[in-house]
Structures are given as structure tokens and as C-alpha cells.
Amino acid sequence: MQTLSFTERVEKRMGARTGKDYIDRLDSAEHDIWIDGKKVEGKISEHPAFKNVVQSMAALYDMQHDPALQDEMTYEENGERYGMTFLVPKTQDDLVRRRKAMKRWADYTGGMMGRSPDYLNSALMAMSQASEYFAQNDPLFGGNIVEYYKYVRDNDLSMTHTLINPQVNRGVSTHEQADPHVAAHVVEKNDEGVVISGARLLATQGPITDEIMVFPSTLLKGTEEDNPYSFAFAIPNSTPGLRYLCRETFDYGKSHYDHPLGSRFEEMDAVVVFDDVLVPWNRVFLMENAKLCNTLHMTTHATVHMTYQVLQKNIAKAEFVLGIAESIVDAIGIGQFQHVQEKVSEIILAVETMKAFVRASEADAQIDEWGVMTPAWAPLNAARNIFPKTYPRLIEIIQLLGASGLMAIPSESDLESPVKTDIEKYLVARNTGAEERLRLFRLAWDASLSAFGSRQVLYERYFFGDPIRMSMTYYTSYDKTPMVGRVKDFLHRDEVVTADAPVLVE
Ligand SMILES: Cc1cc2nc3c(=O)[nH]c(=O)nc-3n(C[C@H](O)[C@H](O)[C@H](O)COP(=O)(O)OP(=O)(O)OC[C@H]3O[C@@H](n4cnc5c(N)ncnc54)[C@H](O)[C@@H]3O)c2cc1C
């Protein structure tokens, strides 16, 4: 594949970009990002909090230009090559092509970068095909979503998103809050666009992406009084007045040996502040329509395609945890114990269950009303309700198997100090020397106990929203009537009991 510079690509509107393209664009944009009391100045790719994860993102984009992976990671349309996760699936084979590209990216990160670009690419792909949904609000918006999809696809942009209003008082709806100006809301509409003020949380990857999708939550359903808070739009992260307030970084600037996950995949989560941000009309997809906002993700099937993507991440993540668990078992010789086998089997079950959900969703996929081949929702919905409970248990298993080994983890610099001989004598494993054992146990610690690992657990609990309200929606939306009817019939079944077997009398 021909590799062009970032500027050449933009001029040519070429698709799939390289890691360098991604970094060049990120570094050339003026973002208003705050961390540890300071505004990020200079290149984002050189800032200690972001430089490592930026390299990981770049590695994902580079796969699109690897001759060995190009056909898996990109597709051709009108003489251009685009990132595979922009492909609009028309057949089950297309779904499989999308799935393989997503899984390839997820495997690279061990599933530890939850918002790799394919997540929102999937959402935007689905929404762009449902332009009539947006046109109900305003015909302009229907065209906007299509043009925005093409713009993001053609330039292979990375996106973050924010759905949730600040956690001030969850007991009342947005318009009933003591201060109605806290949540992001419309303050003005003029010829140029809509002015937004207030805040949203959170935006994972906010500081390391190009654009932000400010979309409605599917879980925090608003009423018509919440119309000023109800919208869907997307803007560049460099838009004046848009500010990111980061938490402290969980990348401590340590080596990959010491901090194998945090030094690579620390995505960062940020509060999003809108300080009178002007959103141009061509970037507005829904405006002041709580009803359309509430059903946006489900009706356009964005949720389905996002969940399909998320499952590839979940499988990669569960497989990665399985690899860590079995490596610990092998390292300290505990594989013969029955409860250990049972615990590792629990991880295997998680892997195989998630894989089965994916295959079921593909087998029952259908063309939807927007003309898109759409995976079956029932298996995906079950999977997304299960995984928030599964992942914390998988991590608990790592803790239970690793035990004190997860704390007996001197750092790389200790290996270069006078205590090296102690380490080499006392921290060997059954099957390997101390250096290799520490490498493994530091990985297990980073997955299960470090700030990075703890965040992953919280992340999975809340990945798709509040698991409690998701369960409530799951319960109310699931059609239980046939099962209840069958039981009722059974309770009133008349049977003649003979000596051999019961005989049913209809
Ligand atoms: C690591 C991480 C990364 C995230 N990244 C993103 C992102 O990139 N983009 C994005 O948009 N969002 C992101 N989120 C936010 C995520 O969408 C929310 O955490 C999730 O939707 C839950 O909302 P909340 O955190 O405001 O919890 P809340 O809604 O405030 O819930 C807090 C507690 O109160 C209970 N509760 C509140 N209201 C009710 C109710 N009505 N009925 C019953 N119980 C209730 C909940 O069950 C929960 O126990 C991220 C979250 C985390 C933890």
C-alpha cells in the first residue's frame, strides 16, 4: 500500500492511515487538556501521561499498512482503502471480516484498550445508514450524519465519546437539578450553529483522539423537559471552549518490564467541559428532541454493532487473563489442585461463552430496516449483561491464584542493584528464573491490583452503563410470556397415570 504523508492524505482524502499520520494530526491540533493542575503544552505524543498510549494507538493504525495484514484490516471501495471497521456489512461474510479486524486489534492490547477506534467506528457506521432516523428531527441532520461518517472514514479519524451528565443528584432528572447549568445544555442557537455550555463525563481517550461524539445516553432517559440537554453532535477536540479535565495518569513512567500494561495502554478518562462551545450546524445530528435521543442507539442499531465490537474485546481480554492464570499455575506448580483447575476452567468458560454469543449473533444475523447486515441482538444483549459480572471474577481468580506472588515483585532497577543475587536466589519459579518470573507476576499485578488493573475492573462493570439499570431493562424487555404460558399449561395438564408411564390427555 502506498504511504503518503498526513498532509498528502488529507488533500487526497485517502482512507486508512498510518500510526505516523495519527500522531502528526494529534500533535498539530490545539487541544485544551488539563492534568495535575497544568495545561498540556507542546506535543501530546511527547507528554509523559500520553506518549506511551499514543504509541499503542499508532501501532493499531500501522497494522492497516502492514502488507501481511492489509487485506484483513482494510477494505477497498471506489479505488480507496479504508479501515475495515468502517465497512457497511451487507452479508454475514462482511460481519466476519469486521470481526476479524476487531479481534486483531483487541489481541494486540490484550483487550486492555476498551475504546480502540473500532468501537465508535462501528457506532458511526450504523448511524450513517439510518440517516432517515435523524432526518425525522430535521432533514439537514440526516445528511449531516452521512457526511460525517464519510469524513471520519476518509480521514480515518479517531473519536472519543461522552454520554453521561455529571453525577450531582441522580435522584431527579436533569432539568430538576438544583443547578440546571451543570449538565451540558443548549444556551443559544444562531445562524452558525448551537452554543453548548456545561459538562459531561466521562470521555475515555479524550486527550488522544481527534474528535468527540457528544451523544445521548441510552440509560438516562430524559423527558421533554430535558430537551435542552438532549442532542447528538460531533466536533473536533480542538474546538474552542472544549476542555478536558484528566484524572491522574496510571502510567507511572516506568518500563514495560515494571508496568507492562500501564506503560502501554493507559487510555485516560477525562471530564468534558463545554465553555460556550459553538457546534456548527453541519455537525448536529439531533437537537432538543429527548424522544429521538432516547431511542437513537437502539433504533439505528448502533448498540448492536458496538456490542458486537465490544465482544471481540471481551474475548481477547478473557483469553489474555486465561493466559496469565495458566502461566501462574505453571510457574508455581499448582496445576494438580482440584480447586485451581476449577478456577482456571471458570476462565475458559468465560472465553467459550463469549465466543458462542458472537457466533450465535452471526448465525442469526439479518438485514435490518436500514439495509445493514446486523448481528442478532438476543445473544449480544445477554453477553453484555453477563460480562460486567464475569470480568471482576476473572480478576479475582488471578488474585486467588497469584497470592503473595503478586506482591513479591521487586522492580527492574532491583535487578540491576546489589540485591540482584537475593532476587535470583529467592524469586525463582518452578519452571523459570527470577527475571522471567517477575516479568509474569508484574503483568499479573498490573492486570489485577495496580491502579491500571483496578480501573479495568471498574471499566468493565460500567462499560455499557449502570449494570443495575441494564438488568432492569433486560428484565422488562425480555418476552417471558411464552414461558409463563407453558408453565401455566403444565400446571393444568390432566394426565392419566398408568403403571408404566404418564399418558397425556389433551
Ligand atoms: C473507567 C470508565 C470509563 C468510562 N468511559 C466513558 C466514556 O468514554 N464515555 C462515556 O460516555 N462514559 C464513560 N464512562 C461512564 C459510564 O458510561 C458510566 O459510568 C455509566 O453509564 C454509569 O453512570 P454513572 O457512572 O454516572 O453512575 P450513576 O448513574 O451515578 O450510578 C451510581 C450508583 O447509583 C445507582 N443508581 C443511580 N441511579 C439509579 C437509578 N435510577 N436506579 C437504580 N440505581 C441507580 C447505580 O446503580 C450505581 O450503583 C466511563 C466509566 C468508567 C468507570
Image (cartoon, rainbow, N blue to C red):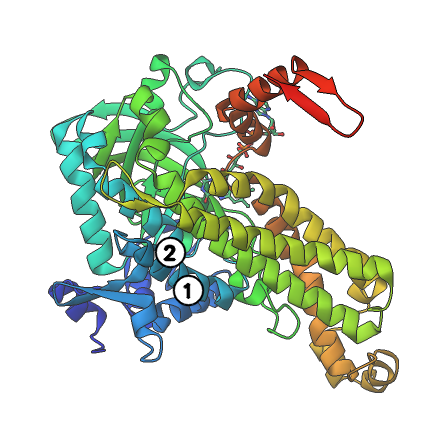
In the rendered view, does 433 fall on the left or right side of 152?
Answer: right
Identify residue for label 1.
57
- For label 1, the crowd category at 10 Å Cα-Cα, with few meaning under 14, some 14 to 19 and many 20 or more, is many
Quick check: marks 1 and 2 in contact, CB under 8 Å?
A: yes
Residue 183 locus on image (x, y percent): 42, 26
Seen from the viewer's position, the closer of residues 428 and 41 is 428
Q: In which quarter of the image is ligand 1?
A: top right
Q: Residue 414: which numbered mark, if any?
A: none
Query: In the image, is residue 218 above or below residue 240?
Result: above
Depth check: 121 or 367 in front? 367
Residue 428 rendering spot, x and y as whole percentages: 83, 81
Within 10 Å of the Cα at label 2, are there few (<14), some (14-19), or many (20+) other Cα atoms? many
Residue placed farthest to the front in the image? 499
Q: Is mark 1 within 8 Å of ligand 1?
A: no
Q: In this view, does 78 lie to the left or right of 388?
A: left
Q: What residue type is labelled 1?
A: Met
Identify whether 295 is placed above or below 396: above
Disc 1 or disc 2, which is closer to the eye?
Answer: 2
- Residue drawn at x 28%, y 23% is 187
Q: In this view, does 440 lie above or below 318?
A: below
Quadrant location of the C terminus?
top right
* Spatial CA span between label 1 and label 2: 9 Å
Q: Name the residue under label 2.
A: 117
- Please, what is the three-letter code of the amino acid marked with disc 2? Pro
Residue 114, percent from left and from top: 49, 53
